[in-house]
Image (cartoon, rainbow, N blue to C red):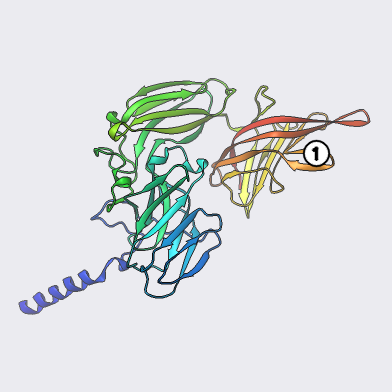
Amino acid sequence: MMKYLLKATLLALLLASCRGKENIDPQIPDPGNNGVAVPTGVIDGIPVTKTIGPAGGTITTNDAHISIDIPAGAINSATEFTVQPITNTNIAGLGKAFRITPHQTLAKPAIITFHYESGDLGRTFAEALGIAYQDNSGKWKAVGGVQLDKEMKSISVKTTHFSDWSFFEAIFIDPGETFTDPGSTVKMAVKSYFDAGMEDLLSPLTKEGTETYINSPKNDLPLKYIEKWELAGAGKLTTDGSHAIYQAPAAIPVTNPATISVRLKLKNGAMGLVLANIFVVPEGIAVKIDGGEWQLLEAATGSSGNGVNRIGGLPREGSYPECSVTWLGVPTGRRAWSEQTYFQMQLAGSHTFLSYYSVGQTSLPSPGYLDVSSIGTAGGYITGAFRMDRASSQKPEGDHVIYREHKIDGVFRVKRLI
């Protein structure tokens, strides 16, 4: 009997050692490692497919956001490669992630390159950008040896395998962006997705041949990394090492948001700068025309569903101005004014403002943007800001209409009804 049990135990151990990572449930954390197991992303764009042979080649997305260089000798026969945009489940991720297939091992390392714009940096510095992939346990892992090209605005890493990939920020201020009431306070801290106690804070990104799990940031950066905090804008900032408290002004400030920056001391005398934005606005839509006083529409609400998003309302029932912003498609993110993203506001006496200006008989969308920071669930908040550099106004006077152009700024924090 004892001999039978011993054989059964040895067989079980042998089978367990042969299973490999492919049988690990991607939703269940592996208790023997760090990292955070999260779901895989879902399809979020049009894939690009290309057949590459033993001589090698390059596959690039249509927007040139990511490219993969397959070297000669990496594969033995012609292979169809696909790059599929997906939602980014990397907790440190920036922008979309990409699913690269087939999931096979290459004989020679390929080079994955992400191209970024200045706005893609989020609120960190280029040296703190990394590239990561999601492993079979559902955890995102940063790949060391990142090559940064600031002139070309690109970062690259080498790999011999493909899966889901994204680029990300390693160091940040928490919160990186928030909307708060006038007169309130906001607690802030500088954090990293890696071990903040290490000698070189960027070594998980720069040390080739290493892979490091991305963790939920629990610890603040040690004092040795903090050079100084600075505030640009209204309010007051009290600092203590890696922590700070922002005191908002008593009213909506002329300049919104306030920008908080932290200058970091890195290895070998290098410096880094991380930023945070704090919008000071009560619940509602605040609008400023041509640099004048802010007008608050307190009764504003919002909705989002079926590709249609809207905020709008009145300062109080039965009064003016009346304002609304409507945008179609993806709920969050920055977009230009267009037929699918438009603003209108009406003052008393049919005085109307629109997100268009006129050139002769042609109407053109105003330069500027709508930047939607967050869309909460029903009962939560829709937050963001907008700017129009050439909004138009039309005001009836007698038997004709007076046409003018204006600069309009706006900040909003409204309850989502549906």
Front residue of 395/363: it is 363
Quadrant of residue 13 in the image? bottom left
Q: Position of residue 36 (x, y in %)?
A: 33, 52
Q: Position of residue 180 (x, y in %)?
A: 51, 30
- The residue sitting at 51% across, 67% down in the picture is 49
On screen, residue 4 versus residue 303, left or right, reads left
- The residue sitting at 40% across, 37% down in the picture is 172
Residue type at mark 1 is: Val
- 333 relative to 236, above or below: below
Q: Position of residue 27 (x, y in %)?
A: 36, 59
Front residue of 84/75: it is 75
On screen, residue 322 versus residue 76, left or right, reads right
- The residue sitting at 28% across, 47% down in the picture is 207
Q: Residue furthest left?
A: 2
Q: Position of residue 165 (x, y in %)?
A: 41, 56
On screen, residue 262 versus residue 3, left or right, reads right
Q: Where the N terminus falls, by quadrant? A: bottom left
User: Badge 1 local density, few (<14 within 10 Å), some, or many (20+)?
Assistant: few
Q: Is residue 415 visible?
A: yes
- The residue sitting at 31% across, 65% down in the picture is 24
- 278 relative to 47, above or below: above
Q: How many labels were placed on the picture?
A: 1
Q: Is residue 92 visible?
A: no
Q: Which residue is mark 1?
A: 359
On screen, residue 109 versus residue 352, left or right, reads left
